[in-house]
Amino acid sequence: MEQNKPNGAECSVGSAPRHIAFIMDGNGRWAKKRGMPREYGHVQGAKVFRRIIEYCGDIGIEIVTVYALSTENYAKRPKKEIDTILTLFEEYLTDAERDAPSRDLRVCFIGDRSIFAPDIRERMAALERATMSRKKRLNVAINYGGRTELVAAFNKLIASGKTNVTEADIEAALYTAGCPDPDIIVRTGAEMRLSNFLLWQSAYSELYFTDTLWPDFTESEVDKIIADFKGRKRRYGAAE
Ligand code: FPP
């Protein structure tokens, strides 16, 4: 049935995922266990983020999406913690700008950018433009919320004059327009929920939950997750 087809992310049994998404949870608990402030966990988490992105590229994963900050985190966490995450984000942006000429990586930002100063927004857009023809892709979800994304998409469609929409129209109006849906969503940190992440795009994603706190997450766990994924049979609603 046409409507139940995933957005280009189909993989046959035994093949590696094209697109892995990570909910990088557990930074705060990791820091607390060490008697350190939560911000220390995010600093460590940012190092692991860089390593895991690099590794996924090295082993041929085409698309990686990371949940760096949700709209709910932004609204509800203390300013000091949010400022740390935004500083880590800006440091990543600076490094990505430096590496862009020599790296086969398209960098995209998904989320509500209104929290950023105009100069940061312009740098984000410039990096997206400069890397848009690269084959591998990283989506950084920052101030992202799945419901906010859907509301923005519907409003965009209404503003364009549409009175009747298709799945393809909605997909084209999302932050992730043109990007295949995630084959697998991995959440670290022992919680088993999606927390408003990629609500539309996760319709047929496999889910993987691990107790590992994000700052302890390793390349060998990525290998284990990929092996697990290869053993799963995806039916997209079809019979066995
Ligand atoms: C969830 O852990 C993690 C976050 C809200 C922030 C994730 C940020 C990073 C990994 C570093 C920054 C990376 C970029 C690209 C800017 P939590 O704080 O909810 O942990 P807890 O559940 O143990 O409290």
Image (tube, grey):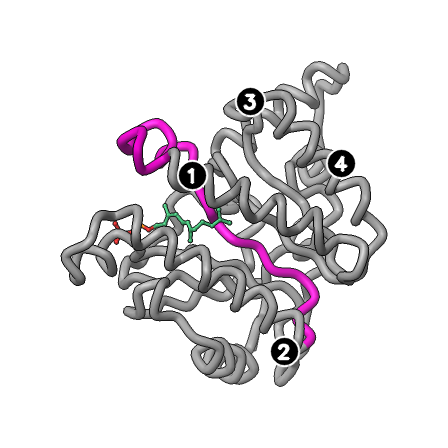
Q: Secondary structure at mark 1?
A: strand
Residue in the image at 79% along x and 49% along y: 131
Q: Which residues are magenta?
A: 60-82
Residue in the image at 28% along x and 69% along y: 211
Q: CA distance from mark 4 to mark 3?
A: 16 Å
Q: CA distance from mark 2 to mark 4?
A: 31 Å
Q: Nearer the viewer, mark 1 or mark 2?
A: 1
Q: Is residue 174 above or below residue 17?
A: above
Q: CA distance from mark 3 to mark 2?
A: 36 Å
Residue under pointer 4? 126
Q: Dot 3, crowdedness within 10 Å: few (<14), some or many (≥20)?
A: few
The front one of 106 and 197 is: 106
Q: Position of residue 1 (x, y in %)?
A: 69, 56
Residue that extends furthest to the right in the rendered view of this protein: 133
Does ligand 1 reach within 8 Å of label 1's beta carbon? yes
Q: Is the residue under label 1 in contact with that under label 4 (CB below 8 Å)? A: no
Q: Secondary structure at mark 2?
A: loop
Q: Position of residue 187 (x, y in %)?
A: 39, 61
- Any mark on residue 16, and which? 2
Residue in the image at 70% along x and 66% along y: 62
The residue type indicated by label 1 comes to Ser
The front one of 24 and 17 is: 24
**Which mark sits nearer the N-terminus, 1 or 2?**
2
Q: Secondary structure at mark 4?
A: helix
